[in-house]
Amino acid sequence: MLAVGILGMMAMVIYRFVATNLTIMRVSSEENAAEARYSGFINLVTAQLQELPSGQGALSGEPFKFNDRPRDEISWICGTGPGLVTRYAPGEFIVSVRLRPMSGKGEQMEIGFNRKPRDTAEGSTEGESWVPLLDKVNSLQIRYYDVRLNAWVERWTDTVTLPKLVRLVIGRPERQSIEAIIPLGRTALIETPQQQLQGQQPQQQPGQPQPGQQQPGPADTKPNK
């Protein structure tokens, strides 16, 4: 009876140990899958924004709020590729990243791409489609870095230039918000005046006179005594 009792206690300890480890592995895998989804979404937006050309009004952003929570939107104009999440679409589209309530989920929101043909009349929903990407999201805040103001702004309406940086802050229920800063352009190399002069001056060959120095002529040659 004592041996049976000891074996029973050992079996109970082993069962609890295995059950605890299985629970930890399941929670860890779910967390890793969730983080991978957010990382994939940020990489997708980064790839698209870095391909946008400047000077064509391809990017715009407007701030919105709902129940004191930011629900900002960012839009761009593009063809097939990462921005449309498809390679089979003719023409150009207006793509907007926005929040939308999940059907039958109460106050839960989801982030997705709203796609609409560029030549569609304003206010019309013809040809419009929705691609959900992230669910269980509370808020979406988007800021743009303006080098002329040296500050982050909440709205971008400049149709000539693109912002140097775009910051995304995704709020999640009962979790820490995810923040990402996306660079859209690189700072050009600025040469100093001295470097510019050195690049313009031709290299002097050995034995050649420097600029402004006269070459000795026959009259300047003195005979040897």
Image (cartoon, grey):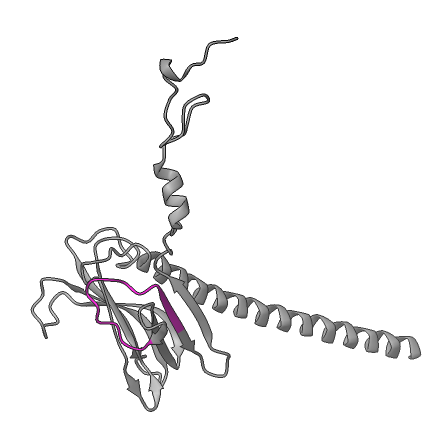
Residue 33 vs residue 176, the one in the foreground: 176
On the image, the x and y values in percent for residue 159 come to 19, 65
Residue at the location (53% across, 66% down)?
32
Q: Is residue 217 left or right of residue 17?
A: left
Q: Is residue 106 visible?
A: no
In the picture as drawn, the residue positioned furthest to the right comes out as 2
- Magenta stretch, residue numbers: 153-168
Residue at the location (37% across, 22% down)?
215
Q: Is residue 218 left or right of residue 33?
A: left
Residue 98 vs residue 219, the one in the foreground: 219
**Magenta highlight: main SS:** loop
On the image, the x and y values in percent for residue 131 come to 28, 66
Q: Is residue 213 left or right of residue 74?
A: right
On the image, the x and y values in percent for residue 90 come to 15, 52
Q: Is residue 76 left or right of residue 190?
A: left
Residue 131 vs residue 207, the one in the foreground: 207
Residue at the location (37% across, 13% down)?
218
Identify whether 167 is placed above or below 81. Answer: below
